[in-house]
Image: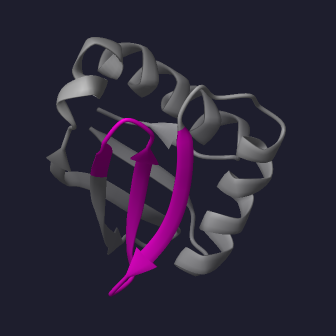
Amino acid sequence: MKIEFPKKPTPQIIKDLSGVLDKRAFPQTISLSHESNDLVVKISKMGTSTLIFTRTDAKKRAEFSLTSENIAFAHKPFYGQFKDELLSVVEEAGGKVTE
């Protein structure tokens, strides 16, 4: 999976995503952070799942490619639904999914 945003610092992108997440009700607890400019998404409830998106910069955009995913056993049945919801959050925050 690859997502992209207009070029801005990763902490600002996380702030934009968090603003959208704050308006939604999720059955899991979702947290966003950055490590070495990468975007880290964690789902914590009945286990912890972690998705890491590695950032690369293009001329006018920031691209994040999913490079690691560790899905908790309890989350596997809902992963497709969560992924669809995450893509919706990305789009509402001004990003787009390219793959």
Instruction: Please say which color scheme the image uses.
Output: one colour
Q: In this image, 85 relative to 71: left or right?
A: right
The residue under the point 77% across, 31% down is 24
Q: Is residue 31 magenta?
A: yes
Q: In this image, 46 relative to 13: left or right?
A: left
The residue under the point 31% across, 22% down is 79
Q: State which quarter of the image contains the C terminus.
A: top left
Q: State which quarter of the image contains the N terminus.
A: top left
Residue found at the very far right of the displayed protein: 23
The residue under the point 73% across, 59% down is 16
Image quarter for residue 12?
bottom right
The spot of residue 52 in percent (x, y) is 28, 59
Q: Is residue 32 magenta?
A: yes
The spot of residue 15 in percent (x, y) is 71, 67
The spot of residue 46 in percent (x, y) is 37, 35
The residue under the point 33% across, 16% down is 80
Instruction: Reply above or below: 74 against 39.
Output: above
Q: Magenta stretch: give its range.
A: 29-50
The spot of residue 40 in percent (x, y) is 38, 63
Instruction: Reply above or below: 12 against 77.
Output: below
Per the picture, the main secondary structure of the magenta-coloured stretch is: strand
